[in-house]
Amino acid sequence: MADARDLLIGIDAGTSVIKAVAFDLKGAQVAVASVLNHYVTGADGSARQSLDRTWADCVGALRELGARVDNLGSRTAALAVTAQGDGTWLVGAGDRPVTDAWLWLDARAAPTVRRLAASPLARRRFEATGTGLNTCQQGAQLAHMAATTPELLVGAEVALHCKDWLYLNLTGIRATDPSEASFTFGDFRRRAYDDLVVEALGLTPHRRLLPEIVDGSVTTHPLSRAAAEATGLLEGTPVSLGFVDMVMTALGAGVHTGDPGAACSTVGSTGVHMRAVRSEDVVLNAENTGYVIALPVPGMVTQVQTNMAATLNLDWALRLAGDLMSETGREVSHGELVARIESWLDASRPGAILYHPYISETGERGPFVDADARASLLGLSAGHRFPDILRAVVEGLGLATRDCYAAMGEMPAELRMTGGAARSRALRAVLSACVGAPVRVSAREEAGAAGAAMMAAVAIRAYPDMDACIGEWVTPLLGAPEAPDLALVATYERSFTAYREARLALRPVWSRMAENRAGDARSHTWGHGAEPTNKTLTASTAAHRSTT
């Protein structure tokens, strides 16, 4: 007797790891398999990823899942795919890659972003997409390619995102989803491409590169024979194209459960802060920043602001402590340092130092866009010690979260949290006090893959609609509310005023420091006015890559 089709597979191809996760039809996680992702960076600000390697790694994750779940192929009712957002994955004749993907981490389009931001159509583009232009996005990257390497676009037949590339390999269909289509090239209200937006990006001559838009909660395509042979799954299995990973993770973690004022923050390497609203209730800020990303729920979108770096700031602080300890002859692991965070915070005073968590070398993108932005500590005195600095870093993450929500309207009535940092009691307490709202943590381990699998569940009619699926897959996994400390709320109200005033005042300083770095780089590379040689540039690039 054939096995019942009692499983759904969610694929989540993130920046660091590609995961394949099996769930039963009621949302319980059955098994997970993962493969490390691979990309390379360059001294020119590039961040590139092989398309073929990405598909091979996805196949590897599915094969590993099959080794962990008996009869996975015959038991799979459907699979769905989500992945890292933004970026540009160019595909040409025969569905072959044109070049390596430009990832969301790629900073090469910065000059083009500055040029497009000064366009008279910039505000109209923002009002249609609800999304501020930055170097992460495919629109900016395609515009930069058109200006600097037009031969790439000549050889391309379609511009995809990461999940779209995997969907093409799974089904043979060139498509993208309503979320990435509308926040990059379209109107979030209509979930369709908008010719004015394409014109504002200077991409009208390349309009042909935009693929069909497919809503994976409504439409599926069958797994192709080639993909079935590669993955070990059954040919014809329905495949759902999920929305972008940010919104899939938030969906799985509780951004939309019908509770008014609820919001969701994913605090991992980056910080993603979002609230679910009806399309007509979107608040567009004056700085043209943030994202509006469609939910797979009719009429509902998420407003989003994203910090380029979140726990990367904590990693820096802990690495600093580890380096100092190693100089005394005591080597400590990262895990040991993480275990000491709570005690370090208990030994420090709240609100004593301000920290702006712009540690990323690509600057900041939310709630403002500035590639030159850098982290800073303000208010240090001789009496401060490492625990005070660590607390300032944690508080910086909380104040940056508040800064993001302030750009989207009112503070949340309740904050749902996911991501690695959500496990920290101290960090949850700081974020709760910074936004002045209770925090709830989702027990969902793989929220991104779950969000994608939920779309497949609705598409194959395991549930009548997404709200019914949320009621069983999401709401029961939300923990009890953790109320904010009212004394900390008052402290961080005062801190936030200074935090925001300081980050506005620092912008010209960041610009001057960027000019200084550029001058130092030219001096170091070329020497005393000498022209650079190919050998010198190659050595410089190799040295950079050895440290990244």
Image (tube, rainbow, N blue to C red):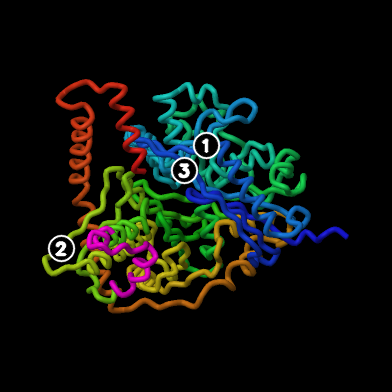
Please identify, in this view, whether the residue under mark 3 or under mark 2 is nearer the observer.
Answer: 2
Query: Closer to the camera: disc 1 or disc 2?
Result: 1
Q: Amino acid at mark 2?
A: Leu
Q: Nearer the viewer, mark 1 or mark 3?
A: 1
Report the disc number at residue 380: 2
Residue at image coords 40%, 39%: 41
Q: Earlier in the sequence, mark 1 or mark 3?
A: 1
Amino acid type of the residue that numbered disc 3 sits on in the rendered structure: Ala
Residue designated by label 3: 128
Q: Which residue is mark 1?
A: 50
| Residue 92, position as x, y percentages in the image | 59, 27
Q: Can you name the residue that lies furthest to the front here?
A: 329
Is 372 in the magenta?
A: no
Rendered location of residue 548, percent (x, y): 36, 43
Secondary structure of the residue carrying numbered label 1? loop
Whether residue 158 can be seen here: yes
N-term-proximal mark, 3 vs 2: 3
- Quarter occupied by residue 329: bottom left
**Residue 529 percent coordinates (x, y):** 16, 23
> Is there CB contact under 8 Å for labels 1 and 3?
no
